[in-house]
Amino acid sequence: MNKAITEGLVLMPPAFAAGLNLWSSNNGRPGDASWQGAANAALVTNDQDFGGCLEMQKTNATQKLRCFTQTPLRPDMYLRISARVKAVAGNLPSVRIAAWVGTLAETNVGGSIVQAGPAVTLTQYGEVVTVEAIVGAGARTGVTMAWGASAAFAHVGLDLTGANGGTVRIDDLVVEDVTGVFLRDMMDMVDVRDYGAKGDGTTSDVAAFLAADAAAAGRTILVSSGSYHLPGNLTINSPIRFQGTVVQPAGNRLVLTRNFDLETYSRAFGSDLEGFRRALQALFYFSDHVTFDMSGRRVDLDGPIDVAALSGLTSFANRRVLRNGSLNAVTSTAWTSETVTSVGTYAITSSTRLSGVANVANIPVGALVQGTGVGREVYVKSKNVGAGTIELSQPLYGAAGTRTYTFTRFRYLLDFSGFSLLSRFEIQEVEFNSLGLCSGVLLPMAGSVFRFDSCTFNRPKDRGVTSAGTGCQGMFIDYCQFLSNEQSLDAQNRSTIAVNVQANDVKFRNNRIVRFKHFAVMNGTSHMICNNHFFQGDDAPAGVRLAGLVFTQTNVATVVSGNYIDNCFIEWGNEHDPEPGFNNEFSFGGLNVVGNIFIASDVSSAFRWLVVKPYGSGHFLNGFSLVNNTFRVFNATVDRVEMVDTSFAGLDFTRSRNVRVEGNTYNQVAQTIQNPIVVSHSQNTAADTWVLDAGGYIPFGGRIRMVESVMPEGAITTAANAARYVFPNALPGQGAGGVQAHLRWGEAVKGKVAAVIRMDMPA
């Protein structure tokens, strides 16, 4: 391809026959002397080899011939400059192609740029010798003079060197475009080497990359073979393809706005792991892309990725998305959990702080806290080494005083705990393949609307998703699978937990969770848990079953709807309460369990699907619905579906309010429950007081607080069958345990009534 034809560039200098005034005896710059009228130069019109040519006698040490006309140069263009010469008399000189190379500012490129090619010595008279040189911006193989990206034009010509006194004849100079030799497809690609990149692994190639990016104009940048040192932050806005690799300090970023995917970054940095790290780092720093696509690739991790340290940030609140790939743990000592045992003091007045903590410097932030009086899933949020204190994610229900605690720091594939604030980060269609070596994701210490969509957590060693602070506020977990590493163990021997929650407004929707110790341990309120299937059974006969959902505060304002709750139960307690006894609060309320499928198989008769566990006395039910659910048992029969765990305290059933238990279906359940309870009572012997006994129908073994209605069926009569048109008064909460209601008629009567009695009072 010849640019002189295709792009209208005038590359050829004028013929000598056009006049020697067009040729300079210096650099070809305005004001330089020409060869017109020089005593040692003349035009020859009939040379047998050249026809018209220039004859010149050498009189200077370096005798210059330069064209006044500028030959245009571009960084993506390579030119061959050639001339045929012969000696005709006197001493035999040497000849070389030479030029004066200028910038857009009309100054010489200067510096170390070579502006004269290798000399060729003429050895005999009359022999035609071709002298040539290839010039261009890049130092490619075969390029005689590399002039760099700043070269804009040249005054081409040649030099005579060596002994003076000889006479030579010079044919017209020829300038040809030989770019096609170096760049196979000029219309689609620019090579960073054409803009001065060295690719030697040590010289900074940042300027060359930027120049190539600026010149690309929609074409693809080619990073040809080599190792390119980029000691700084670099953003490339053109499509780019890597044959070579880049070397960049850890603190610097490479942002590829048109190829922001794992495939490109892996090629750029020479490995999937480093490519993943660098692309994830760049994700936090530019606005052209909000999504990092892993290209469906698997990345093997030999240790946790500290995302905050990688990004160099501790706070970020713009939406970003990681999607479409797999993170795969490989065996490494970097996955080993760190465990520290230390003594600390807890006071209810500082409900989320341990003080006087020994060895506090060695206790890692994000560690699980365990000890007497500590509820489940309490973590270290921060520490103050100077003050000897630790800030906890939740209060402790029964740890007042000084005692020993164990702090265990799990290792995670992605660790976001270094962010003091991170909001609106999303992970979509990513497999966290922990393989029993490590945990999945540790959330930031604060932030909102973290989202997992269509992800798989495969065999986490300790935890799937952990919240050690409030970074779970408003979190979404949708269409995900959690597959336990402990599926072969009996339920009571498992220790892994799929998810924990410390804050409010979490949505779990359409997930599948298989054989963990717990699906979710949840503090906070206003959660929506919908359309999930979580099952935690085992193969043991009459096996022990553990909680699937654990709520850790009293008033949860939460909906549990449309779930398949399989061989596990809902546990509702207040283990994250520093004063677990009732203290003028809402007490156990706001839980709506609606339209779920509850299944159990091969369990003991003592199994229950709903367990309320007060950690202090005085609590009561204050707003609870168990409506339109299906309960079914296979290969066993259970006594009932609900209970109060009185390990610490019971419930005060004299204060129950707004309890609704109705529309449920029970199969292989010995005792059904309901509230309100519809009682059909036949009194065959006349009596002043009729006793209505709700017995085991009262949810949680509560007591009757209210007789809502009484409707006689037929006549109410005396013993002598005389009709009486009277209405009784009602006395709820009678008998042992208050499970009866008495109807008092004022005289002895008999008959039949339908009564609605309740364990609760309206608000």
Image (cartoon, rainbow, N blue to C red):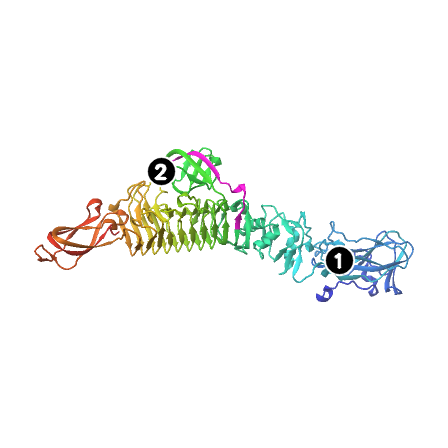
Task: Give the side of residue 757 with respect to residue 369, left or right.
Answer: left
- Circle number at residue 398: 2
Q: Determine whether, in the image, residue 26 is placed left or right of residue 541.
A: right
The quadrant in which residue 582 appears is top left
Q: In the depicted view, which residue is nearer to us: 310 or 76?
A: 310
User: Would you say residue 685 sits in the magenta stretch?
Assistant: no
Is residue 30 in view? no
Q: Which amino acid does label 1 sit on?
A: Ala
At label 2, the amino acid type is: Gly
- Cα distance in 3D space between marks 1 and 2: 86 Å
627 or 512, nearer to the observer? 512
Other-residue count near label 2 (Cα within 10 Å), few / some / many at <14 / 14–19 / ≥20: many
Q: Up-down: is 236 above or below 375?
A: below
Across and down, in percent, residue 101 comes to 75, 55
| 339 magenta-colored | yes
Image location of residue 71, percent across then percent down? 75, 60
**Which residue is located at x 72 percent, y 54 percent?**
140
Residue visible at 66% across and 63% down in the picture: 187
355 vs 467, nearest the viewer: 467
Q: Is mark 1 on a helix, strand or loop?
A: strand
Q: Which mark is residue 632?
A: none
Query: Which residue in the protein does label 1 denote?
Result: 154
Residue 464 visible, this orientation:
yes
Nearest the viewer among 683 and 556 is 683
Residue 234, x across and y down, in percent: 60, 51
- Magenta segment: 327-349
